[in-house]
Image (spheres, rainbow, N blue to C red):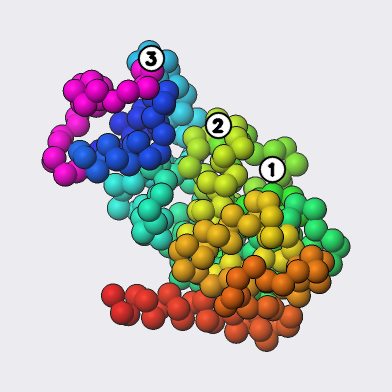
């Protein structure tokens, strides 16, 4: 088992991405190599002659100290891939996060009734209201709502859930301390209501172009089903749909998205929700699918 201290430092090595780290960790496990400190890892990297890495140990240690200090000061949990409380839903995907940074109730990530509601940042008024109302209804059905804390459909979903005094998970594409100022109020409401804000980026990290897509795979992975309110045929939401399909999660569109795009659905086996009855039916099907899989295993 590799400690979180070493995992964080691995991520700070210039040129060492998630795939390289995963391969290296697999090698360490297979060879049963013991790493007691970062110096042991550096020796291993040197022995393996891994190319294209720029290792500035002093800079890495400075950045590591900043990360740990910001986590402790802001009560953000550091959860590594080998920790007992690392979410099993994320552990089951191929491209799993190496380290998670969590503010709030981490147990929600393993909940069996998580439903994601996602969509465009610029929805119609109807789309915004549908996101909010569906989230409110699902919260009343004891679901935890998962979304991305973005403007538009995401924001409406979080707000609707909170109106019903439900719990919601926000998966963010930046570090916790770089959430946009306009979203800080919603962030605080989520935490005060017993929810969870999670990122695979350290607290001081800024959102990058790639991190929005990375964020969407986590949304899909921790959810039993994904509802697309508006958007979804292109842009960020389409990635969430693709990840949901890859992870064999239930997917639903609303009639709103079909009408606004004027297009047929991208794939077969996608539900269309146009009533509360169908919303609850989708929720039940999503949860039952997960239960059936668990029983079969």
Whether 135 is drawn above or below 281: the answer is above
Asked if labels 1 and 3 touch by Cβ distance under 8 angstroms, the answer is: no
Q: Which residue is mark 1?
A: 184
Q: Which residues are magenta?
A: 29-55
Residue 237: tell me if it is visible: yes
Residue 7, quarter of picture: top left
Mark count: 3
Asked whether residue 40 is drawn in magenta, I would say yes
Q: Which mark sits nearer the N-terminus, 3 or 2?
A: 3
Residue 56: numbered disc: 3
Residue at position x 46%, y 68% from top?
A: 248
Is residue 55 rendered to the left or right of residue 116? left
Give the position of the C terminus as an image quadrant: bottom left
Q: Nearer the viewer, residue 102 or 45?
A: 45
Q: Which residue is mark 2?
A: 205
Whether 73 is drawn above or below 184: the answer is above
Q: Nearer the viewer, residue 117 or 190?
A: 117
Outermost residue, bottom side: 277
* Mark 2 crowd level (few <14, some 14–19, many ≥20, 10 Å Cα): some
Name the secondary structure under disc 2: loop
Q: Nearer the viewer, residue 209 or 84?
A: 209
């Amino acid at each position: 088992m590799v400690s979180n201290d070493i995992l964080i430092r691995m991520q700070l090595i210039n040129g060492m991405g998630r795939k390289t780290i995963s391969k290296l960790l697999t090698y360490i496990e297979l060879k049963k190599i013991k790493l007691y400190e970062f110096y042991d890892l550096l020796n291993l990297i040197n022995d393996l002659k891994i190319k294209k890495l720029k290792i500035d140990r002093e800079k890495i240690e400075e950045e590591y100290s900043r990360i740990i200090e910001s986590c402790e000061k802001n009560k953000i949990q550091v959860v590594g891939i080998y920790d007992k409380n690392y979410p099993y839903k994320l552990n089951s995907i191929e491209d799993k996060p190496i380290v998670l940074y969590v503010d709030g109730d981490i147990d929600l990530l393993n909940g069996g009734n998580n439903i994601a509601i996602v969509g465009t940042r610029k929805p119609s008024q109807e789309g915004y209201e549908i996101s909010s109302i569906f989230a409110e209804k699902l919260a009343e059905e004891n679901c935890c709502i998962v979304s991305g804390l973005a403007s538009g459909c995401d924001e409406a979903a979080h707000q609707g859930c909170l109106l019903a005094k439900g719990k919601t998970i926000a998966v963010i594409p930046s570090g916790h301390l770089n959430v946009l100022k306009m979203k800080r109020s919603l962030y605080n409401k989520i935490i005060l209501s017993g929810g969870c804000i999670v990122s695979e980026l350290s607290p001081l990290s800024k959102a990058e172009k790639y991190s929005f897509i990375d964020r969407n795979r986590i949304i899909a992975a921790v959810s039993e089903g994904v509802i697309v309110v508006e958007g979804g045929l292109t842009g960020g939401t389409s990635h969430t749909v693709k990840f949901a399909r890859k992870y064999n999660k239930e997917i639903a569109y609303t009639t709103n998205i079909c009408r606004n795009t004027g297009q047929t659905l991208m794939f077969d086996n996608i539900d269309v929700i146009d009533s509360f009855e169908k919303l609850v039916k989708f929720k039940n099907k999503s949860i039952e699918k997960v239960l059936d899989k668990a029983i079969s295993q």
